[in-house]
């Protein structure tokens, strides 16, 4: 157990699991950076330092992929020798070897990104037998995400048994949404089982808010719309830094169109698919989560490849891009119409790196006061050296920014805060 008193410095290992990959990173937190009871933003940019990061891909398949580098960008993967990731157990063994390399500090705590907490937990959770039991129940809400996370957590807790383990949920940031934004028009008997809009990408959105608050050169936007555009995509509306509405719902499948997910569908489409010969709930789920979206319309779910194909005259790729941008515009415009906007933010792989998508989406919002600086939008994001980069014209009524999603950093902040709080304050269940 990490005690609040006497702890000079913390090293926090963060794990972010995917369906066939694990991202991991180590963060160092200085003394006093996260006082017990302080907000997640109390430390500022200087209170948290990334030491290294890695990603292990191809879990469960034949292709092993390992990226492992320190904060200066030096490749550390060669120090690990042969890599096997045919199973989650083998993958965790690789992470354990990476964490245990000579010269690297052992973790004082481990934090995990977990997609869905289910219907009976609020807030991030210190992992106990009770919490793990509730997470197993929650797998019915996120069957493509939570089981892998639980397998990883179990293996990590066995290997690092003497340190706290904390689950940070993508839904927590959206717990501030009003009831009218979360309720589905379904019978009460269904709603009481926890069927409602939860929202996801919350750790990403929270990191955006934190970075905007820390950016000294800009005024914090009271009304904010965040477009997290990557393999998964969502749009979130915030007022005073708190979520008031978002596009994803009960699961990460709903909302805007995504890389392999449909986004919002007429429920009748799902019923139609279920009536087809041989259809099962699992087969329909695989279709709408893994074989839909950009992949279904354009043939691939990589926006860079779609842009290339569209430029070569591929009609399918062009249609996929147009449908994608239109779905994001509709969501952003709806939130701006509801509450207004002082700023919009693009984040995620597409949001941060695809100038064409930003240009097309922002251009369609021109009538709502969005004016891009076309030259600023075209600059390579990393070339500017800025974390928060403004790409709107000086005359734009709505500011437009690119801000990187820093989910791992936000997890490390929460873990540090919870470990330096009392155990009772760290766990909130309903």
Image (cartoon, grey):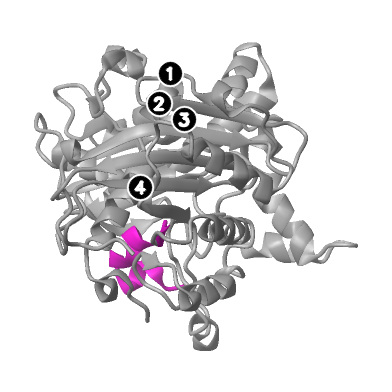
Marks 3/4: CA–CA distance: 28 Å
- In the picture, the disc for residue 31 is none
Q: Please, what secondary structure does the residue beneath circle 4 have?
A: strand
Marks 3/2: CA–CA distance: 25 Å
Q: Residue furthest front?
A: 102
Residue 406, compared with residue 73, is above or below; it is below
Q: Is residue 179 magenta?
A: yes
- Marked residue nearer the N-terminal end (1 or 4): 4
Residue at image position (58%, 46%) is 18
- In the picture, the disc for residue 74 is 1
**Numbered-mark total:** 4
Q: Residue furthest bottom?
A: 189
- Marked residue nearer the N-terminal end (3 or 4): 4
Marks 1/4: CA–CA distance: 20 Å
Quick check: marks 4 and 2 in contact, CB under 8 Å?
Answer: no
Q: Please, what secondary structure does the residue beneath circle 2 have?
A: strand
Residue 326, compared with residue 402, is above or below; it is below
Residue 423, image x and y in percent?
Answer: 28, 72
User: Where on the picture, by quarter, is residue 79?
Assistant: top right
- Marked residue nearer the N-terminal end (3 or 2): 2
From which residue to which does the magenta span run? 165-184
Residue at image position (72%, 53%) is 286
Residue occupied by mark 3: 350
Q: Residues within 10 Å of mark 3 (few under 14, many from 20)?
A: many
Residue at image position (73%, 66%) is 271
Residue occupied by mark 2: 70
Quadrant in the picture for the N terminus:
bottom left
Residue occupied by mark 4: 12
Can residue 75 be spotted in the picture? yes
Quick check: marks 1 and 2 in contact, CB under 8 Å?
Answer: yes
């Amino acid at each position: 157990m990490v005690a609040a008193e006497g702890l000079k410095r913390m090293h926090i290992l963060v794990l972010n699991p995917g369906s066939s990959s694990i991202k991991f990173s180590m963060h160092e937190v200085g003394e006093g950076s996260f006082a017990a009871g302080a907000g997640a933003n109390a430390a500022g940019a200087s209170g948290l330092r990334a030491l290294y990061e890695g990603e292990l891909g191809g879990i469960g398949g034949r292709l092993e992929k390992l990226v492992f580098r320190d904060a200066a960008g030096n490749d550390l993967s060669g120090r690990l020798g042969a890599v096997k990731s045919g199973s989650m157990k083998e993958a965790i063994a690789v992470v354990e070897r990476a964490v245990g390399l000579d010269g690297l500090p052992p973790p004082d705590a481990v934090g995990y990104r977990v997609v869905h907490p289910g219907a009976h937990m609020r807030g991030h959770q210190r992992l106990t037998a009770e919490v793990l039991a509730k997470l197993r129940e929650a797998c019915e809400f996120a069957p493509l995400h939570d089981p892998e996370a639980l397998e990883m957590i179990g293996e990590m807790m066995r290997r690092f048994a003497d340190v706290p383990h904390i689950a940070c949920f993508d839904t927590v940031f959206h717990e501030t949404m009003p009831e009218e934004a979360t309720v589905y028009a379904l019978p009460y008997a269904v709603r009481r089982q926890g069927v409602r809009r939860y929202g996801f990408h919350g750790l990403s959105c929270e990191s955006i808010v934190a970075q905007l608050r820390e950016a000294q050169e800009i005024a914090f936007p009271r009304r904010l719309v965040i477009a997290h555009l990557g393999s998964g995509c969502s749009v979130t509306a915030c007022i005073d830094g708190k979520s008031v509405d978002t596009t994803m719902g009960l699961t990460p499948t709903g909302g805007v169109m995504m890389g392999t997910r449909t986004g919002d569908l007429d429920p009748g489409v799902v019923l139609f698919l279920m009536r087809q010969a041989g259809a099962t709930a699992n087969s329909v789920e695989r279709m709408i989560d893994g074989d839909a979206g950009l992949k279904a319309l354009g043939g691939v779910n990589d926006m860079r490849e779609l842009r290339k194909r569209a430029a070569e005259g591929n009609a399918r790729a062009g249609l996929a891009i147009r449908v994608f941008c239109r779905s994001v515009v509709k969501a952003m415009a709806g939130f701006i119409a509801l509450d207004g906007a002082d700023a919009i933010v693009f984040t995620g792989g597409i949001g941060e790196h695809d100038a064409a998508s930003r240009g097309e989406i922002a251009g369609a919002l021109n009538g709502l006061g969005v004016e891009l600086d076309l030259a600023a939008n075209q600059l390579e994001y990393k070339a500017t050296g800025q974390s928060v980069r403004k790409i709107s014209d000086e005359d734009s009524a709505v500011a437009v920014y690119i801000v990187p999603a820093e989910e791992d950093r936000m997890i490390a902040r929460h873990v540090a805060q919870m470990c330096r709080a009392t155990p009772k304050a760290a766990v909130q269940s309903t």
